[in-house]
Image (spheres, rainbow, N blue to C red):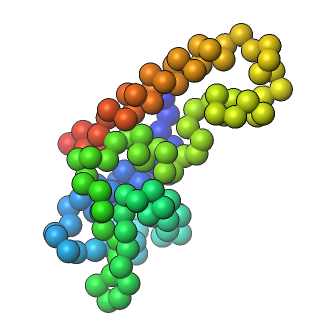
Amino acid sequence: MFRLSKQADYAIQLLYRLSLLEKNKALSLRTFSDESSISFLFLQRIARELKKAHIIESKQGVQGGYFLIKKYTDISLMDVISAIDKPVFAPCVIDEKTCKFIHTCTIKAGIERVQKKMIALLKATPIAGLTA
């Protein structure tokens, strides 16, 4: 069973809300926090990661806030998960030093195959399809 983290879920909610903004408008995290009842500090951490991933950007000032820099329909579930939840999947597939059983592991090859399929599926799944 695939489980979406709370952070990724909230990130998708934030991205959806940003997709509703008029052109050249920004949304303050405080406003979104009040609208959604999601902790402002939690949203700040999420926004920071989405900004580092070049999905959103911010502007300062009275009319400041966050806005999308990537087209909403082009943002995949993999984009969000990669930005918010690191690492994706089994750490041993990414870095063999994380597992003391790596040289005798009987499932590593199978896990790698599943991981490749999951990554392909997540890349092919736009978040716009989740919020429609």
Q: Is residue 36 visible?
A: no
Give me the residue at 45% from left, 56% from top: 53
Q: x, y (%) of residue 86?
A: 58, 45
Q: Nearer the viewer, residue 8 or 108?
A: 108
Looking at this view, name the residue that lies furthest to the left. Answer: 22
Looking at this view, name the residue that lies furthest to the right. Answer: 100
Looking at this view, name the residue that lies furthest to the bottom. Answer: 62
Q: x, y (%) of residue 94?
A: 64, 33
| Relative to 42, residue 78 above or below | above
| Relative to 98, residue 29 above or below | below
Q: Nearer the viewer, residue 11 or 57?
A: 57
Give me the residue at 34% from left, 42% from top: 76
Q: x, y (%) of residue 70?
A: 29, 57
Instruction: Give the quarter of the figure containing the C terminus.
Output: top left
Classify residue 15 by image quadrant: bottom left
109 with respect to 50 (left or right): right
Q: x, y (%) of residue 32?
A: 35, 68
110 with respect to 60 (left or right): right
Give me the residue at 45% from left, 30% from top: 119
Give me the residue at 48% from left, 29% from top: 2
Question: How many labels, in total?
Answer: 0
Q: Is residue 67 visible?
A: yes
